[in-house]
Image: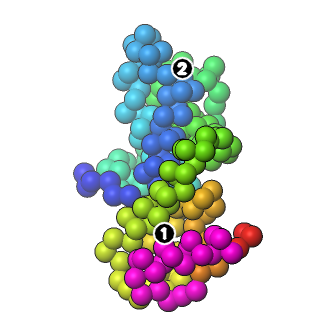
């Protein structure tokens, strides 16, 4: 099986879906108490399948190849109807898919958490780090389309990067120039 490489922000979303699935089931301690830790691989697989389908816009065959599982397993996970925790008494591919779908919906609709001022300041700097990290290996000068492709899925001060990039003048010659232009766009725009 090939190593799973990130597609934009898919790895992070899949991880959040996996954790939310565990939370829906009552947490790791609850799974351990009921002897259900064997469910974790199925939940991880289903979380990735659902996320790749929704965020990566991949076909079932592409997902199967990427994860090293059968196309039938992918189809089974995606065919599952979203279920409530009360309906989940035994995790198989179908129920893992049901749970992953519920968790995915929850992750994508969660409201942002209120942050204290210190944490908000730190996060306001982290966007620049995430942009720079995503740009590693990119060729410059960079045009708007390539920037959108490379940075898709990132958030800048609570906004999707794509919205912010619309207000940036292109081409840009260096990563530092892009950061500066994004910062200026944030300060002058009412996006």
**Residue 141: which quarter of the image?**
bottom left
In depth, the one of 182 and 140 nearer the eye is 182
- The crowding category of the residue bearing disc 1, from other C-alpha atoms within 10 Å (few below 14, some 14 to 19, many at least 20), is many
Vertical order, 66 against 35 (above or below): below
Depth check, mark 2 against mark 1: the one in front is 1
Residue 98 visible to an observer of this rendering: yes
Residue beneath label 1, please? 151
**6 lies left or right of 60:** left
Q: Which secondary structure lies at badge 2?
A: loop
Q: Quadrant for the C terminus, please.
A: bottom right
Percent position (x, y) of residue 114? 66, 41
Q: CA distance from mark 2 to mark 1?
A: 35 Å
Residue at image location 55% in from the left, 51% down from the top: 121
Specify start and end residues of the magenta stretch as a single range: 169-188
Residue at image location 36% in from the left, 23% down from the top: 38
In depth, the one of 38 and 26 nearer the eye is 26
């Amino acid at each position: 099986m090939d190593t799973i490489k990130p597609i934009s922000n898919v790895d992070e979303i899949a991880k959040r879906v996996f954790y939310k699935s565990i939370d829906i089931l009552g947490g790791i301690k609850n799974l351990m108490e009921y002897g259900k830790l064997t469910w974790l691989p199925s939940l991880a697989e289903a979380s990735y399948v659902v996320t790749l389908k929704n965020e990566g816009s991949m076909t079932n065959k592409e997902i199967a190849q990427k994860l090293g599982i059968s196309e039938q397993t992918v189809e089974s996970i995606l065919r599952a109807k979203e279920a409530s925790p009360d309906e989940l008494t035994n995790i198989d591919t179908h129920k893992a898919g049901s749970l992953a779908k519920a968790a995915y919906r929850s992750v994508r609709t969660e409201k942002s958490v209120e942050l204290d001022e210190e944490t908000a300041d730190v996060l306001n700097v982290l966007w620049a780090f995430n942009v720079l990290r995503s740009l590693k290996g990119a060729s410059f000068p960079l045009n708007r389309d390539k920037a959108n492709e490379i940075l898709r899925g990132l958030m800048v001060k609570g906004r999707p990067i794509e919205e912010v990039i619309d207000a940036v003048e292109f081409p840009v010659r260096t990563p530092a120039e892009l950061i500066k232009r994004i910062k200026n766009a944030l300060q002058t725009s009412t996006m």
